[in-house]
Image (tube, rainbow, N blue to C red):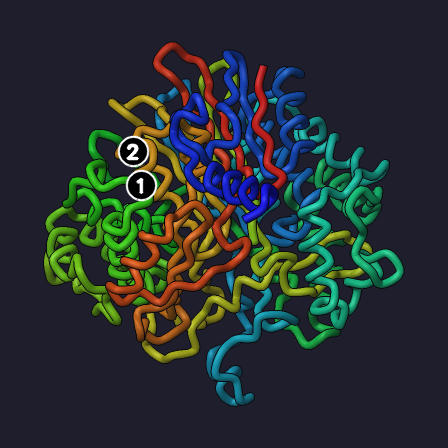
Amino acid sequence: MNKITCTLILIFSLVNSASAVDRVTGFDFATRSPVLATEAMAATSQPLATQVALEVMKQGGNAIDAAIAANALLGLVEPTGNGVGGDIFALVWDAKSKQLYGLNGSGRSPKSLTREWFIDNGYSQIPSHGPLPVSVPGAVDGWFMLHDRFGQLPMAEVLKPAINYAEKGFPVTQLIAYYWHKSVPKLSQFPGFTEQFTVNGQAPKAGEVWKNPGLANTLKAISKGGRAAFYQGPIAQTIADYMQANGGFLSREDLASHRGEWVEPVSTNYRGYDVWELPPNGQGIAALQILNIMEQYDVSSMGHTSAEYVHLFTEAKKVAFEDRAKYYADPEFNQIPVAALLDKSYAKKRAALIDLNQAGKHYPAGNPALEHGDTIYLTTADKDGNMVSLIQSNYRGMGSGMTPPGLGFILQDRGEMFSLTEGHFNVFAGGKRPFHTIIPAFVTKNNQPWMSFGLMGGAMQPQGHAQIIINMVDFGMDIQAAGDAPRIHHTGSSEPTDEVMSDGGILNLESSFPYSTIRTLMRKGHNIQFANGPYGGYQAIMRAANGVYWGASESRKDGHAAGY
């Protein structure tokens, strides 16, 4: 054996035997320490958006103004995940009233479209792209609902940074350029996309300066004319005419009649921490159901990367997601047993289904009523103690591909999430809100704000929410390490549009899980695969007892946390 070989073996051994003492945090996967500040904090998925949020607060705006400004800019700089053509959800901690408020800003399906139309035209499921999955975009209405209730600066000032960047341009970041490039081949077939979202038919490259004058004009119209400029004026007419001309059903009446909704957040207490989510039509309560099951066990004694913990978490997720597939839908069309689903005694009965030595191939959905019981996320906090947890998305990255002429944005394709199965809670109906994957989260302790956080990524979101809480509460991680820690991502059918899970689904484990853990999990019957990128994108702000804000952002994406 020569010297080079010996050296390589030594290096490999050192790298793979990294211990907790390698980092002052005590966790060798931690990318950096949390960001600390006293006056304000912002954490978004793109550095320019974080800077804009802080600038708005320095100019006299509050956390709500900052969140809207950051979201507007993200629609420009990260069109691969969101935009004014999508929906919005938010949780707002209001320092004055010391209460948490929930916003459901999801749009409804076209009133003139029916399940029977899909069946009569040979559809067994709703297409992922094109005109048919398009529902009313709720983001702009959501901005004004937030602003009218909590905002301080005029909306024209809030939207000004996004307008300036849209006119002058910004350099496209590496990860966003990657996802943009992947979207172009699929979406170029739809009218208006190539003209407004490519450079000579190609996605902009990393570092290339991108401008969007159409979006600048749209935002100018909104800043002057308010929400009516989007839902009732020329913008609405352009959207409706474009959809009708291209085989769609979304009408001017659908847009004009749209209204978001203030909803009561729901929570569960996990070992002394109240974790808050929004009720359906979103999937937030799945995170709470997972936590209720995990609370039945001594998780802290297991170890974060142990087979024992990963197995238990995966099975808890499977059990919760069967309820998710059956019950989560628009509450205006169904009586959804939210309180019963979150009841602790119900969680005990569901936990009893889990075999600690064997992966479950299939779990039945529960019957709680009888037991009585591709997205952006951002968070902001200001000097007065207001905190915002906000998530916004077009779905499937850039959305449906339907790009109305001259407006600079793509319409969402959330309607794909509807089921066409008659009798399903989430079955398609005109004027109905689809099941939603995007969910903001919040944590209080002793009735005081503790953490605003979220994690992007479809069905990964409730899994990620639960893992962040477990990482901090059970495994003692700080707010940044909790997001850096390797994640568990289980996939299976069990979507609201699919049949129940069979064969146990697929378990993806991120780098840093030891081979001994993977081997033990395989022996328990888990189907393990490896994948790049489906583990979500995390941002968080924690408020310490002394009023200091702790910020964290996602090391897997272009995220940035900063404060002053």
Confirm or deny contact between disc 1 and disc 2 (CB under 8 A).
yes
Q: Would residue 227 be found to the left or right of residue 173 on screen? A: left
508 lies above or below 487 = below
The front one of 143 and 174 is: 174
Q: Residue at x 35, y 43 (%)?
A: 467
Instruction: Identify residue type, mark 1.
Output: His
Q: Is residue 82 visible?
A: yes
Nearer the N terminus, badge 1 or badge 2? 1
Which x, y percent locates residue 88?
A: 53, 46
Q: Does residue 231 appear in the picture of this structure? A: no
Q: Which residue appears at 77% of the width and 36% of the height?
A: 163
Q: Which residue is mark 1?
A: 304
- Residue 259, given in percent of the width and then of the height, sits at 51, 50
Q: How many C-alpha atoms fall within 10 Å of the one at disc 1: few (<14), some, or many (≥20)?
A: many
In the rendered image, which quarter contains the C terminus? Answer: top right
Find the distance from the CA under tag 1 to the CA under tag 2.
Answer: 7 Å
**In the displayed image of the protein, which residue is found farthest to the right?**
200
Q: Secondary structure at mark 1?
A: loop
Badge 2 element: loop
In the displayed structure, 80 sits above or below 299; it is below
Q: Amino acid at mark 2?
A: Phe
Disc assigned to residue 168: none
Query: Which residue is denoted by mark 2 in the rendering?
Result: 475
Using residue 445 as the reference point, say whether residue 21 is left or right of it: right
At a point 50% along the width and 12% down the height, the residue shown is 38
Binning the other alpha carbons within 10 Å of mark 2 as few (below 14), some (14 to 19) or many (20 upward) gives some
- Residue 290 horizontal/vertical position (percent): 27, 50
